[in-house]
Amino acid sequence: MADNPKEYQIQPGDFAPLDKQAGPDNEHIAAPSLTFGQDVWRRLKSNKTAFTSFIILVLLFLMAFGGRAIYHQNPNEQAPRYANLPPKIPGVNLPGFNGHIKQSGQDVDAYAQAGAGKDVHYILGTDYLGRDLLARIMYGTRISLEIALIATLIDLGIGVTFGIISGWKGGRVDLFMQRIIEILSSVPSLVVMVLMATAFQKTGMASIIAALALINWTTMARLTRAQTLQLKNQDFILAARTLGESAPKIAWKHLLPNLSSVIIIQTMFTIPNAIFFEAFLSYIGIGISSPQASLGTLINDGQKNFQFLPYQMWYPAIVLIILMLAFNLLGDGMRDAFDPKSKR
Amino acid sequence: MRKYLLKRIFYLILTLFIVATATFFLMKLMPGTPLQNEAKLTPSEKAAILAQYGLDKPVWMQYFIYIGGIFKGSLGLSFQFSDQAVSYLIGSRMGPSMQLGGQAMVIGVVFGIILGAVGAIRKDTWADRIATIISILGIAVPSFVLAILLQFYLGLKTGWFPVAGWQGFLYTILPTLALAASPLAETARFIRTDMVDVLSSDYIELARAKGLSKFGIVYHHALRNSLIPMVTLIGPLAAALMTGSMVVENIFSVPGIGEQFVKSILVNDYPTIMGVTIFYSALLCVLLLLTDIIYGIIDPRIRLSGNGD
Amino acid sequence: MNLKTAAKVTAVAGASLLFLAACGSKNSSSSSSSKNTATMAAQAELPTMDLSKSTDVWSSNMLNNTNEGLYRIGKNGSIKPGIAKDTKVTNGGKTYTFTLRKNAKWSNGDKVTAKDFVYGWQRTVNPKTASQYAYLYSGIENADQIVDGKKPVSSLGIKADGDYKLVVTLEKPIAYFDKLMGFVNFFPQNEKVAKNYGSKYGTTSKAMVYNGPYKMSGWTGTNLSWKLTKNNDYWDKKAVKMDTINYQVVKDNSTGLNLFNSGKIDDTVLSSQQVKNYKTNKNYKVRQTASTFYVEFNRADKDAKLAKAFKNKKIRQALSYAINRQQYVKSTLGDGSTVSKGYVSHNLAKNPETGADFTADAAVPEAVKYDQTKAKQLFKEGMKEIGETSLNIKLLSDDTEGAKKSTEFVQGAWEKLPGLKVTNQNVPFKTRLSRSQNGNFDTVISAWNADFTDPISFLSLFTSDNSYNNGKYDSAEYDELIKKAEGADANNKNARWTDMVNAEKQLMNDEGVIPIYQKSEAHLTRTSLKGIIWNTAGTNYNLKYMSVK
């Protein structure tokens, strides 16, 4: 070992300034800059369940609203000759999809029995009037979704406005508005909906939407109010106030963006709720009227033949269940995604 | 406390009053009378029948008579059953509904707690996953679908339980199960979320540090603290049970209020619709009041005061 | 909330897996009927057991088997003696003198006397009782005026002559009077019991007294099950074989079938797909009802264009030709119902001379035929006649299962006609009735169920002044024929028959209403149950001679 540390001499040339441009920048934000929305989307994507649900929902929406572009059957076209035919997919010889059913304990080719030709086949079978069940399910899903979405939108409007006003004004106004909510929420919502649907003379979609919208907004109002109460004393709102912004403008520009997560999450739970109530009302016979269909009426029709043609109830029921599942799970996922504390 | 109670009771009565008023006028808007053979009735017969139901008087008078009647426990006469008081109808139909509702509530809450607790303790294991699947399905599968499936598979195919009817305890099992699914799911979800929070809190860490057994911790510390907010679930659960009972009772031919309510709607039996609505609202209001009181008693952090938050 | 993802994915996937779940059904046909007991399903609650107030099918069924009037309606609508032992008709068919049997008793031990009949009848026509079927008394002396509140109740044409002789006076001969006497609203009532219970009379099985083959128990007034047990005070108790008949209300046909298959009930009504699967079952039975479903046109429609259209015979014919009834009944209804041969139902009445069915004598095959080309042709011609190119009509009906099916089917059939758009309106039964009666409809699918086994029960509906003539069918010839059948020819069976046959032909040739189908009930009834008597009109069930083998 020739080198003796003691003998090492430090010379000025040993130190050279680093190139400032090339070195690591501590101020630099390494991760890409994300807006709140992008962040939520990213977290949502990382949540497999929520993302699966999201995809499923997208598919269901496509099926419901755009399905007729691919599957051309008219959901209201009757072919009484072909009533109550089981599912048959050409080339598939699986029980349940080969057009055979059990009748009086015997396996019967229902298509042959109905005198249907070789080219007649219904992927999910037909109903009691010989209407294509797949087309009807697509149609029914659409109606169910339409009802739920419109109702939820109205709901949102009433609930959010009510909540913001109540929270913002405070005092007597708040107290009074809270009483209204209290009274409304101590009445069983379904009973009120039933009353509404009955009172509106069972006129179909409009009456159900009205009934759903008039009842379901209280939770939304309560949540927005609580959030508004919290927000209204925060500095940015105070600043806006001192600068003389008008109350509606503050609500629109400052409150709403900050309320959006609460609203979106709540919406995700309101929609399945609305779907459920619509199905329920239609099931007990005061919902959508024929020849319109919703998932509820389809289940109700199918239930009558459940023993013999289980598919008539199973398929709409499964669509309903998947819809409910997907919305609920997506809602869960959204809640996690919107909550900065739940980062994992 | 007393002031709070008085205030709540005042609001309860106010709520019921508003419900009664709203229902009354909604029903007045609609067609339909107790007349069965309207075309064949003579004017004096019609008058006699309408008088029997108090429908001969002007609407405002009918309203005051109706509201006054509620205080005396009278809800008018049913259109569907001749000479039958609605209050009697509700009274005689109450037993089965209450029994089913009670059983479903107990089963739902007990198993929901177990399921939720298991999920929280064994978080992220297969047990948790199964518990989660059950609870999420309980929310997604509507009670009417579940009831039909239960009736067909557990009633008819296997013959384990009676298919329908109301002749003893055995007959209550399937409808109870169909009704219990939703409270079970709600409870399990609720308990699980709450317990996951509780289990990660400091005092549980302390208990663990003291060397308490896992069961001891859950039973003595975690569960107890999770159960307190559970009380607030009772109201919504009861409301969900009322909803469920309408179809479940129908499918299983149970002589309950829900079954009657649906029938009344279908035959436009307005006095019964009004009566059941008021009854349901009263029930829910009282339940909500009770849960608030119980909540105040068992959770020392809550003070019952006259003011809202 | 931080649930493990896999669990939720599985949940979604699990639900999707349900797609594959399918099942076949297997049934164990054990029976709940043991020696002399059986369980039947009722399709609706029992609204009352008050003889004066019964208007519905089930209370009438129950009253008919727990009580008895002057006559009992037997097989094929035959008149069998009830409390009346002997009948004399005098005064050109206007006075009936009944001799009552002395051994008839109420279930509380009281004797059934002529006074019970007088009390029962007077109670029913008394406006204070608010009976809704009192119009059936029309034709009995002073009945109409009493019902209208213009004469005292005591002036009704019924008098007790001692305990066992009853004299009934009519205003004019009534050809079907004996059939009416088998109808529950004409049964005797026990004054003591009725007064004792007051407004509670007939509201529970206890607040009632019985003089028929069975007694009722276990009915609280609102519950869904009750029992008929043999009445040991019944005068003909020897003929009654059953000890107990249990009733269970089952509103849902699938529940009913499940109950039947699990052996809990011995009789249930089937719906269409159930029929397809049980058609070959040994327990399968079709019970026809005297109930016709038909389309009415509102000739007084507020929409003048439609009123004009409905007054046009060709358009009415076109709408009739457009409906493929055969297919509807077979494929869609599939519950054993049959295509209407005319407006009056099949198996209701027979020619007094030849024994031929009314529908055979009065057949107008063209009126219920399906012919789409003809329909289109006639529709085009009709539209030209009224000078229109398109019509937009609403089709009103109930919101029940069957009614919805009917409207959907008819809508589908009619919309095949060029220029015709149909909107369905399914509303609750009572709303439909009130709308029909107020003329607030374009077309309506109505049903009529005969009160008794005589064609007049159907035909009297469409005289121009009848309150049930919702579509305002107006034919002087028709009115004249019905008037003759009810008046001048009332005592001449053959002439009356011809009048009614011609009236029906007139109505059908005019296409005054479009008959669609005649309702039947498809049942599963255990073959071990014997002796159940079913009648198409009036009260359906007579279980007096029922037995279990």
Image (spheres, coloured by chain):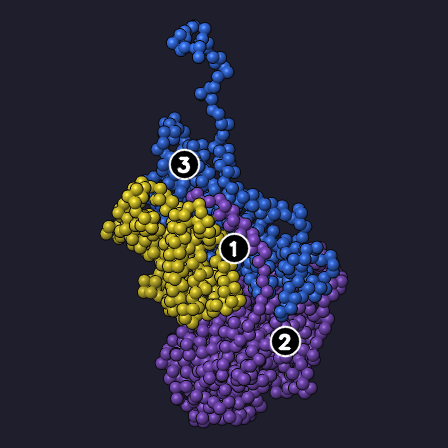
Query: Mark 1: few, some, or many residues within 10 Å (few <14, many ≥20)?
Result: many
- Residue C106 in sight: yes
Q: Position of residue B209 (x, y in %)?
A: 30, 42
Query: Closer to the camera, B220 or C245?
Result: B220
Query: Mark 2: few, some, or many residues within 10 Å (few <14, many ≥20)?
Result: many
Tag on residue A279?
A: 1
Q: Identify the residue shown where x is 35% and y is 42%.
A: B200
Q: Position of residue C125 (x, y in %)?
A: 46, 79
First reached walking from the N terminus: tag 3 or tag 1: 1
Q: Are marks 3 and 2 in contact (CB under 8 Å)?
A: no
Q: Chain of mark 2?
A: C
Measured in 3D between alpha carbons, the distance from the residue under mark 3 to the one under mark 2, in whole angstroms, is 75 Å
State the quadrant of the C terminus of chain B: top left
Q: Are marks 3 and 1 on the same chain?
A: yes
Q: Position of residue C129 (x, y in %)?
A: 43, 76
Display colour for chain A: blue
- Give the mark toward the camera: 2 or 1: 1
Display colour for chain C: purple
> Helix or strand or loop: what does disc 1 sit on?
helix
| C284 sits left or right of B288 in the view | right
Question: In the image, what residue type sits under mark 1?
Answer: Ala
Measured in 3D between alpha carbons, the distance from the residue under mark 3 to the one under mark 1, in whole angstroms, is 36 Å
Display colour for chain B: yellow
Measured in 3D between alpha carbons, the distance from the residue under mark 2 to the one under mark 1, in whole angstroms, is 39 Å
Mark 3 lies on residue: A341
Mark 2 lies on residue: C345
Q: Identify the residue shown where x is 58% and y is 67%.
A: C25
Q: Residue furthest top?
A: A12
